């Protein structure tokens, strides 16, 4: 008889739970979840109490460990069937048997409320949740996804807002928060998420995301005006103007096959470059171009953006790495207070040499306090 090591058993389990379609079109995760529920509900009478279900759940969790995806599917099925008491006992059993997931306490609180469990029990769960809340952003986002699945959008949005407050430069809380806010349908929340996207989300497709944010906020402004809510319309307009403004934007453009690097040294002495593309004050390189010949147009661009900048002297450094540049020059454009009445633009033609070219500029009305 060949025995499997713990790692081998775990790998074998993970393989069996991968979400691949079965011959009936059902995923392995759904199939496994149904197997769990069959073990818990088969042979139990309609009038069975919580203790009976608790014992069956304990047996299930003692037999093997299940992935988060399988457990999520099982409890979602119970929720859809309105079998709230069975779900509560299963979640409590998962905690007793060390099978708790990052979302366990949140979902347990929801199911307890629906099962009309005593307020004292619910309070204990909520207190345990405070102790269990993970600091890992990925785990927080998994909890948000689980809460949304259980239609607990209020709690999901609250977690997104807290995550955004702690990790404002990470895109996930804003993008997930946008989706949750849209489900809730409250204009205030929708504006919150999209203003955050305009300020903090600079993924590869940021232009599309920013355009959607602007259009949606503008639509919400118009809807507020139509229903006669001038105060909301004015507040949304001010927030859009603030989110859309950029204290500093520096763009380097050139043509040819050369590789140029744009580096910005902020007043604190911190340098934003291709190695460190985001700084503590929120400055970041949002476009980095290696000058690859794969770029058929031959036009290249690197860009630094700081939504809320500190006052002081900034240094823009342009470094020639290799290759050929048309006319041996590049154009550096420095924009301050972009999208505001105080917007200014300065363009410099940089002659490229072996030595770095440095262009300094001063910010005296930055919004970083």
Image: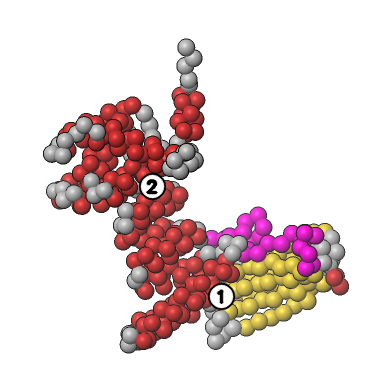
User: What residue span does the magenta drawing correspond to?
Assistant: 272-298
266 to the left or right of 214: right
160 to the left or right of 95: right
**Which residue is tagged 1?**
247
10 Å crowding of disc 1: few (<14), some (14-19), many (20+) = many
Q: Is residue 280 magenta?
A: yes
338 to the left or right of 192: right
Q: Quadrant of residue 219?
A: bottom left
> Which percent across, then down, holds residue 213?
49, 72
- Is residue 334 or residue 61 the one in the foreground? 61
Mark 2 lies on a secondary structure that is loop
**Which residue is tagged 2?**
134
In front of the other: label 1 or label 2? 2
> Overall secondary structure of the magenta stretch?
loop
> Which percent across, then down, holds residue 331?
75, 74
Q: Is residue 171 magenta?
A: no
Question: Please, is residue 68 above or below residue 147 in the view?
Answer: above
């Amino acid at each position: 008889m060949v025995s499997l090591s713990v790692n081998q058993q775990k790998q074998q389990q993970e393989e069996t739970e991968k979400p691949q379609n079965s011959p009936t079109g059902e995923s392995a995760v759904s199939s496994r979840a149904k197997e769990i529920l069959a073990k818990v509900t088969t042979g139990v009478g309609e009038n069975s109490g919580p203790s009976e279900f608790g014992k069956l759940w304990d047996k299930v969790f003692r037999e093997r460990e299940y992935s988060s995806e399988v457990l999520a599917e099982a409890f979602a099925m119970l929720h859809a069937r309105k079998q709230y008491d069975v779900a509560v006992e299963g979640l409590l059993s998962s905690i007793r048997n060390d099978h708790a997931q990052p979302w366990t306490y949140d979902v347990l609180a929801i199911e307890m409320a629906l099962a009309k469990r005593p307020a004292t029990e619910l309070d204990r769960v909520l207190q345990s949740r405070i102790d269990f809340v993970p600091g890992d952003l990925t785990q927080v986002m998994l909890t948000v996804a689980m809460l949304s699945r259980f239609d607990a959008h209020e709690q999901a949005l609250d977690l997104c807002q807290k995550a955004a407050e702690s990790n404002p430069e990470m895109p996930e809380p804003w993008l997930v928060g946008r989706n949750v806010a849209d489900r809730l349908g409250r204009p205030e929340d929708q504006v919150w998420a999209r203003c955050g996207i305009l300020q903090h989300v600079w993924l590869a497709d940021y232009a599309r995301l920013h355009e959607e944010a602007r259009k949606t906020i503008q639509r919400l402004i118009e809807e507020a005006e139509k229903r006669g809510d001038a105060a909301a319309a004015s507040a949304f307009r001010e927030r859009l103007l603030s989110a859309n403004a950029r204290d500093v934007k520096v763009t380097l453009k050139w043509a040819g096959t050369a590789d140029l690097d744009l580096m910005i040294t902020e007043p604190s002495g911190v340098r934003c470059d291709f190695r460190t593309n985001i700084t503590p004050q929120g400055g970041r390189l949002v476009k980095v171009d290696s000058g690859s010949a794969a770029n058929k147009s031959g036009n290249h661009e690197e860009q630094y953006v700081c939504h809320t900048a500190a006052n002081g002297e900034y240094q823009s450094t342009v470094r020639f790495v290799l290759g050929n540049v048309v006319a041996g020059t590049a154009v550096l454009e420095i924009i301050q207070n972009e999208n505001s009445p105080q917007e200014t633009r300065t363009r410099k033609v940089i002659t490229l040499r072996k030595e770095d070219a440095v262009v300094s500029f001063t910010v005296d009305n930055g919004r970083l306090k």
